Image: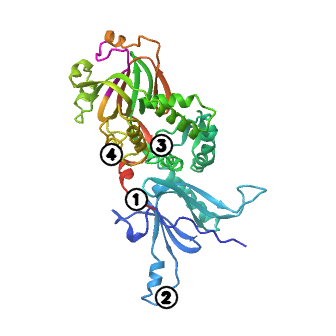
Amino acid sequence: MLRRPRRSRVNAWEGGREEEARPRQREERVLLRGIFEIHRGSCDVVLSERALRWRPIQPERPAGDAKLNLQCKEEFIELKNIFSVKLKRRLCIKQPGSGTLLGITLFICLKKGRNKLKNSALDLINLSEDHCDVWFRQLKKILAGFSNRPKSLQILLNPQRHRKGAAQVYYEKVEPLLKLAGIKTEVTGSNNVLVHSLCGLPHVVTATLRIIMGDLRPADVCTFSTTGKLLRFGFSATFGFGGRTLALAEKYQWMSPNQRRDFAVIKALAKLKLEDCEISFLTFDSSQDIQERREQGSRESDYNDQWQTIQGQFLNVSIMATPCLCSVEPNHRINNGGMALIIARDTSRPEFIKHLKRYASSKNQFNFPFVETYIVQEVKVCPKNTTSGSNTEEEEKSCRIASEEHFPWNVDGDLLWVTSTVHVRLHPGLISLYGSTMEEMSDPKITL
């Protein structure tokens, strides 16, 4: 006896009900029409160029039956939100994949709350092989038409982080979704420091679905160099407290990630150290005059009058091309062409702790008298015992550390030891990354 399908957990589709949707801009061409059982009820299903629509088939009743009219409201799913389609068969242990055909299953990406996404499934039940084959082929053809969706990926995974927890998260939550979407993968080897900035929250399923759906967004990238030598590319960095905390944490790899992080923070706070350095920066010009002059081949000295310099003792220096959690963060975009330079001067330990705590909340962590913020295009951080302030090659060499002291930098969660001036330069829209639009991340009305 055929078991009736379990009711789908999806109870509110991306598109919603017909009467709640925006008016159709033009009449859509109907591709297929047929009868399927959906949510344990027979439905008239129509596949058009943009959506899959269905309406329950009800027996005729006397006119004016309000209950009947409510039940017959049309529902739909926009095709752009479907990321996979499979033939649904009865489980056969002896011959997997060859059981009795039950219908078609659509796998859908849905919004849940402000930034979070979730995957769900919709079963279209019909026992006809020929009928399902026609629909299956048409749906596969439609999905193949989304050219922005990746067909293969190289996964960067650090199996040594978090006591091999990164590998467990990947194989339990990420890989099944990628396989479901038919994406070929090759695992090679780092971290998810960008997930929050790109998706609005550190949620692995949301990040995976953004990739599957092909939601590409341009992103600014920084280069970190010293004495004319490129150190690495990155998106954010901290010098001072942030760098020293990471350096401490790296010494205690035998601890769990949370214990190691908390211990390093407490130890660094117990002995706060000021960094004596000079910071030079080129302010961000929204008119892009400087960028245009650079693209035209102008020398850096041609616009040296835009550079500003501050010096003194600082607890922490942060440089971010990506936004943090705080809604008032000065660089609240991943592709606006500017970096946030955040400088924390000397202050009491309790006040500095308040500042740090606000980085993990939506409160304004910059509303302190000892915190300065700037929007910049380039930054040079010259630690103690160096001389900075010039852009010539000879004077750049003079910025090398006289002693053997190395200074720790935290660049995207990786420890970088540097002995001389670090030059950070922003490259607007250099690469494209998978993530949500800023409109989606800032719109609290988007719900499931």
* Contact between labelled residues 1 and 2, with CB atoms less than 8 Å apart: no
Residue that label 4 marks: 328
Q: Specify few, some or many for label 1: CA neighbours under 10 Å numbering under 14, 14-19, or 20 or more.
A: some
Cα distance, mark 4 to mark 2?
A: 58 Å
Left-right relation of 234 to 26: right
Q: Earlier in the sequence, mark 3 or mark 4?
A: 3
Residue in the foreground of this view, choosing between 346 and 241: 346
Q: Residue 60: where, in percent of width, then height?
A: 50, 86
Q: Residue 144: where, in percent of width, then height?
A: 51, 49
Three-letter residue code for mark 3: Val
Left-right relation of 338 to 51: left
Three-letter residue code for mark 1: Ile
Cα distance, mark 3 to mark 2?
A: 53 Å
Query: Which of labels 3 and 2 is toward the front?
Result: 3
Q: Earlier in the sequence, mark 1 or mark 3?
A: 3
Q: Specify few, some or many for label 4: CA neighbours under 10 Å numbering under 14, 14-19, or 20 or more.
A: some
Cα distance, mark 1 to mark 3?
A: 19 Å
Q: Residue 411: where, in percent of width, then height?
A: 46, 30
Camera sees residue 412: no
Residue that label 2 marks: 61
**Residue depicted at x 44% and y 45%:** 360
Three-letter residue code for mark 2: Arg
Range covered by the magenta-colored residues: 378-392
Query: Which of labels 4 and 2 is toward the front?
Result: 4
**Residue depicted at x 37% and y 65%:** 27
Camera sees residue 238: yes
Residue that label 3 marks: 195
